[in-house]
Image (cartoon, rainbow, N blue to C red):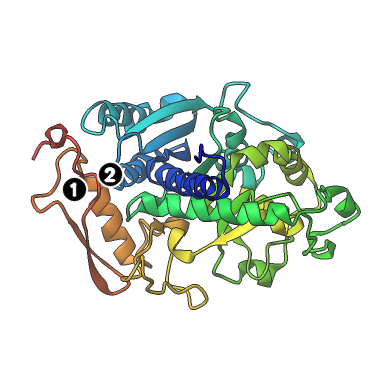
Amino acid sequence: MCIGKCRHCLRMSRVFLLLLFLFLTQLRGNCEVLHIVIVVCGNRGAQAFDALKSIILGTDALNAVRIHLFAEPLESILKDVILPLDQLVKGCARGAATYKIYDIDSSHQKHDSAFWSSKEKGFWTNRYRCSAQRLYSFQALESSVDAALYVDTDTLVLQNVHQLLHQLQAMRSQSALRANHSSDVGNHFEATEACSAASTCPSRMTTSTGGIIFSAADHCALSYVQSQRVPFYEPRGLQAGVIFVNITLYRTMNVLSEMDSILSYPGFDLKEGDQDALNIYASRHQNAILVMPPEYNWWGEFADCPLKPSVSNPEALPVILHGADMRWYLPIEPEFVKLYNLFHSIDVCKPFEDRTLSFELRGRSHVIAPAFWNQNADESRISD
């Protein structure tokens, strides 16, 4: 009599374990918490809250989003972000989102390097000093956080947050493949120390990190190619307004130390701040980068980065719309302005009568049904 040790039973056990693994993997993808990192400074509070509203509107599951909010100083965003966010997640969005606030001013969160003292009064620090903390903020997250998504304050999530989790899973899959083929791990900053100007530095210095650390979108413009100010991720550089980050690798590969070296190196003309720093890092560690599809960071209609229909996105609608270069406010993108004003006026807890949003984008009419307004969860939290 077979007691589970014969060949066909062992084979069935292996099949069962494989099916169980695949089921649990799928379950994790469906139920995983999405960690969002956002850095808010100066007068960007109201804009940041609109970005957070769009994220919550895209949730359709319990505990779907964990928001990590970095600010300098906290008092500057108390009215525009902290109080309304707290009211939202304790009110109609309870269970859908949680948040944690980090004070950049506190000594254990703020990372000052020689860069700040050497360029204290420069254009870079006036425009980018606060947002540069995105390069350091990941180090401050809880040790249990394996991966996170950074978004600029001038972004709007237009689709279900599960779309973002799909990209995160793609990043993990590619990371595992590259890690299996990894043979050397190195930091090549010393090799470029002799460079007296960015244009003389090697722009393609591939090293292996053992997996993907950053996933960002193609810059979709030729500014890096034309200026050659700094080494960049070819062919056009990376746009840093939306970044997926493997936090575990970020910590173990000591990315923080190399970013400090890049920011403090006098030979680099960092006019685009931490975006330049990310590109320099990516040019040295190309195997650590995964270029995401343009719909995850779409900031205008560029011939080199068109949005194309797909099975999962037949209308070629951006997953994340990015109002880079003040597109929320300037007439160069009137559709962006109208869409931002629409989200700014929304009360998440009071859905429109038909529970949809209508807007124009790319000369086409779109209607989306925010997942949060149409979920099967406790509808009593939302007042009609």
Q: Amino acid at mark 2?
A: Asp
Q: Which residue is at 74% across, 61% downward? A: 231
User: Element under label 2?
Assistant: loop
Q: Which residue is mark 2?
A: 60
Query: Which residue reaches farthest front?
Result: 1
Q: Amino acid at mark 1?
A: Asn
User: Element under label 1?
Assistant: loop
Q: Classify residue 265 as left or right of residue 191.
A: left
Residue 62 in percent (x, y) is at: 30, 35
Q: Residues within 10 Å of mark 2 (few under 14, many from 20)?
A: many
Q: Which residue is at 41% across, 50% downward? A: 154
Q: Which sits in the foreground, 199 or 253? A: 253
Q: Which sits in the foreground, 50 or 328? A: 50
Q: Which residue is mark 1?
A: 374
**Contact flag, marks 1 and 2 (Cβ < 8 Å):** yes
- Of the 4 image quadrants, the one containing the C terminus is top left
Q: Which residue is at 21% across, 55% downward? A: 369
